[in-house]
Image (tube, rainbow, N blue to C red):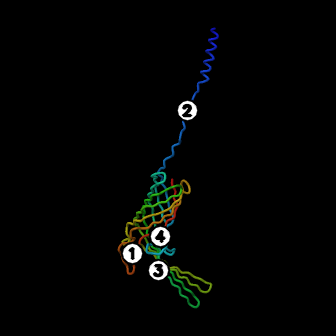
Amino acid sequence: MNKLFLGLALVAGSLVAAQETVVVETATITPVPEKPHARVGIKGGANASQFSDQKLSLNNQKVGFHAGVFVNVPLSNKISVQPEVLYNQMGAKTITSSSEITSPTTTTKTVSDVKNYLNYISVPLMFQFRPGSFYMEAGPQFSYFLNGKNEGETTITKTTGSSTSTETISNSGSVNKDIVRKFDIGLALGLGLDITHNLGINARYINSLTHTYNNYIMPGVEYNSKTNRVFQLGLNYKF
């Protein structure tokens, strides 16, 4: 009888053990996306500038450059603000005269132009919308005039039969700082593309809202009607 009860107890214990289920809970770890952070960078490129009273033409474009530093501060995943400090060359090129005289044997062509170099320290404050690697930007630009110069050049080309000779006469002088306004305020619009995580390309147009010159008038020239207009194309590198 004792053996019978012992056998029943062993069978019952085995059934209870078989019915027990051990549940192991596994925790799923979701990676937290890294928050965008501020990044410092350098940038530089070419400028093509002219004055507002000139027609849009390659003949009126003065080539210069811009270079400086910036910091890009994300405000959200798609919005950022980017203050910059740049050395910025503005100004214009003007064809002052062009003539062509033909004699029985020789054609003489004379072209004279003046380049106005106006050098500024510029501080753009750009607000950028970044749906992806491509972005659009807009913001004000504040500039302080440093110095400048005027360069005049006359090119005389003579053609006789199949022979051509060219003579160039140049002169230059510093800009009178008293006639240039110290502060320039403009509006900038641009487009950009992040080529890699560090390297990018940017195109920008700046239209000054303030006159370039003070109320300084020479015969036939009203300087205070001019404003700066600049096209920029450059590269930027973020660290």
What residue appears at the point 38 percent right and 81 percent down from the top-left corner?
A: 219
Q: Position of residue 226 (x, y in %)?
A: 41, 73
- Calculate the distance from the C-alpha at mark 2 to the C-alpha at mark 1: 80 Å
Please state which amino acid type lies under the numbered disc 1: Tyr
Sequence-wise first label, 2 or 4:
2
Mark 2 vs mark 3, CA separation in Å:
85 Å
Q: Identify residue for label 1.
A: 223
Q: Nearer the viewer, mark 2 or mark 3?
A: 2
Q: Which residue is mark 2?
A: 25
Check the image and report above or below for 64 versus 111.
above
Q: Mark 3 sits on what residue?
A: 96
The Cα–Cα distance between marks 1 and 4, rounded to whole angstroms, is 17 Å
**Mark 2 against mark 4, which lies toward the viewer?**
2
> Measured from the top left, where is residue 31 in percent x and y?
53, 42
- Residues 82 and 119: in front is 82
In this rendering, the label closer to the viewer, 2 or 1: 2
Q: Earlier in the sequence, mark 2 or mark 3?
A: 2
* Amino acid at pointer 4: Ser
Q: Reply above or below: 199 against 230.
A: above
Image coordinates of residue 214 in percent, x first then y, are 36, 72
Is 192 rendered above or below residue 6?
A: below
- Give the SS element for disc 2: loop
Provide the secondary structure element on which disc 1 rests.
helix
**Pick the front one: 161 or 21:** 21
Q: Where, quadrant-wise, is the N terminus in this rendering? A: top right
Residue type marked 2:
Glu
Who comes first in sequence, dot 3 or dot 4?
Answer: 4
Q: On the image, numbered disc 4 is attached to which residue?
A: 49
